[in-house]
Image (tube, helix red, strand yellow):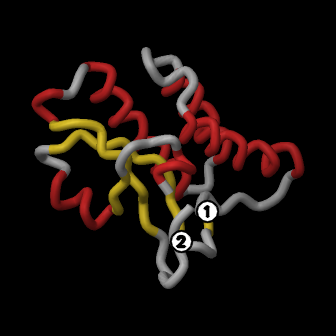
Amino acid sequence: MCKLYGVDAICSDETYNVVKETICCRAIDIVVVKGRDTPTVLYEIVTERNLASREQLTVESFSEQLISFLRSNDLLAVLNGIDQTMKVAGYEENKALQLLRERCLPYLTNGLRFTGIQAYSEKSF
């Protein structure tokens, strides 16, 4: 999944809850993967918290808001959050954000019901 999202390392929300005090992570999506029934939040492992830049900490905060918007199926807020995050230095061309935007736009233009959760039928990509 790292390749799909354009990141070096990913962890689940279970791991994130263990390391969040010492590791700066960016929430990138809510997914259901093969072999699981419940959605899990995927996080990009960014850096040690004490080494994180102001931009990385800002994006970490924005990413938690995005996940909240996804969970509440608030499509416009998701898209606005993506725009806000992409304005932070270094995130203008972020693949994970672009992927999420591409997934959201058809729901907005076609009026389909948006669930905020991406289902994957394969364990790795």
Three-letter residue code for mark 1: Gln
The relative height of residue 85 versus residue 24 in the rendered view (above or below) is above
Q: Are marks 2 and 1 in contact (CB under 8 Å)?
A: yes
State left or right for residue 2 relative to residue 44.
Answer: right
x%, y% of residue 124? 52, 66
x%, y% of residue 80? 60, 31
Q: Which residue is painted at 38% across and 30% down in the image?
A: 59
Q: Nearer the viewer, residue 2 or 83?
A: 2
Residue that label 1 marks: 118
The relative height of residue 12 versus residue 102 in the rendered view (above or below) is below
Q: Which residue is painted at 66% across and 46% down in the image?
A: 75
Q: Residue furthest right?
A: 110
For label 2, the SS is strand
x%, y% of residue 98? 63, 36
Three-letter residue code for mark 2: Val
Q: Which mark is residue 32?
A: 2
Q: Which residue is painted at 62% across and 45% down in the image?
A: 100
State left or right for residue 56 relative to residue 77.
Answer: left
